[in-house]
Image (cartoon, rainbow, N blue to C red):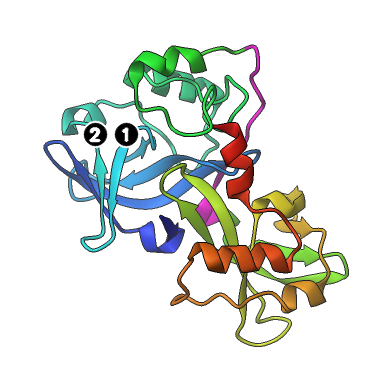
Amino acid sequence: MLLKAKELKGFSLKSIDGDIGSASEFFFDDQYWTIRYLVANTASWLSGKKVLISPYSVTGVNKDYQELAVELTKKQVENSPSIDTDKPVSRQYEGVYNGYYGYPNYWGGLYAWGGHPYIERDRANWRLSASEEMGWDRHLRSSNEVTGYHLSARDGEIGHVDDFIIDDETWTIRYLVVATKNWWPGKKVLISPKWIENLSWDAREVAIGLSRETIKAAPEYTDESLLTRDYETGLYGHYNREGYWVDELTAV
């Protein structure tokens, strides 16, 4: 299921034995564009302490009740390593965090989740993701930080990042929602992170190798749009690109 990041923000986090807060933002890596952590706002429970929740722990999304099911106890979350969300999440912290929960290191393998293209739920297989030999140097970015970044086409600026579309099965960011109101009024379009040519964190800019006219002519996206496979096929067809689902079928 494809979900908007802004929609997921505020969803209640339901642990095994009660509420642990709500999702406030997401940290994703800048190589696979995959969500690595949800930031839990625990204001009503742990006096505002912010903790990270890995997608390894998220076992379900209920849009009707605006809830995320988390396979952890409140005690586990309460005793989890503390994090300062105003500072970068270090590899050292992630190592401590994964050690606390017993999670594999996602950066130790060929795929987005280490040895697997999808989140492996069977703990018996987690050892396959533990190798550091194929590790990659990831940088984690906040969804709150990147929202508002400018989008630069080949022939000039065209808009800004307004939201993210997340696949709740792989926790991959499938699309950036780009608002183009600074070039022509009102329209939003979707851009795949795979089409990004350069990211400038200092300049707060995303560069993509497409012309403004190509982006302008793309299928419009609205908050009411249904992200069906037919819609996605038409979108990728417009950009003359192969759908992400084709690549993932070959990786499984």
Q: Would you say 37 lies left or right of 252 here? A: left
For the point 40% across and 43% down, the residue is: 38
**How crowded is the residue under tag 1: few (<14 C-alpha within 10 Å), some, or many (20+)?**
some
Q: Is residue 231 above or below residue 31?
A: below
Q: Quadrant of the C terminus?
A: top right
Q: Residue 43, how many percent across, how many down?
A: 24, 49
Say which amino acid is labelled 2: Glu
Name the element at disc 1. loop
Q: Can residue 33 be found in the magenta stretch?
A: no
Q: Which residues are magenta?
A: 133-145
Residue 86 numbered tag: none
* Residue drawn at point x = 32 percent, y = 39 percent: 58
Asked whether disc 2 touches disc 1, contact meaning CB atoms under 8 Å apart, the reply is yes
Q: In the rendered image, is residue 49 in sight?
A: no
Front residue (pair 41, 215): 215
Residue 197 rendering spot, x and y as whole percentages:
79, 50
In the shown orientation, is residue 134 left or right of residue 11?
right
Q: Secondary structure at mark 2?
A: loop
Q: Is residue 132 visible?
A: yes
Of 176 and 93, nearer the camera is 176
Position of residue 68 relative to residue 237, above or below, is: above
| Residue 136 magenta | yes
- CA gap between label 2 and label 1 equals 5 Å
Q: Point out the tag, 2 or 1, that comes first from the N-terminus.
A: 1
In this picture, is 241 found above or below 77? Answer: below
> Any mark on residue 57, and which?
1
Residue tagged by mark 2? 71
Q: Which image quarter: residue 78?
A: top left
- The location of residue 175, given as percent across then percent down, is 58, 58
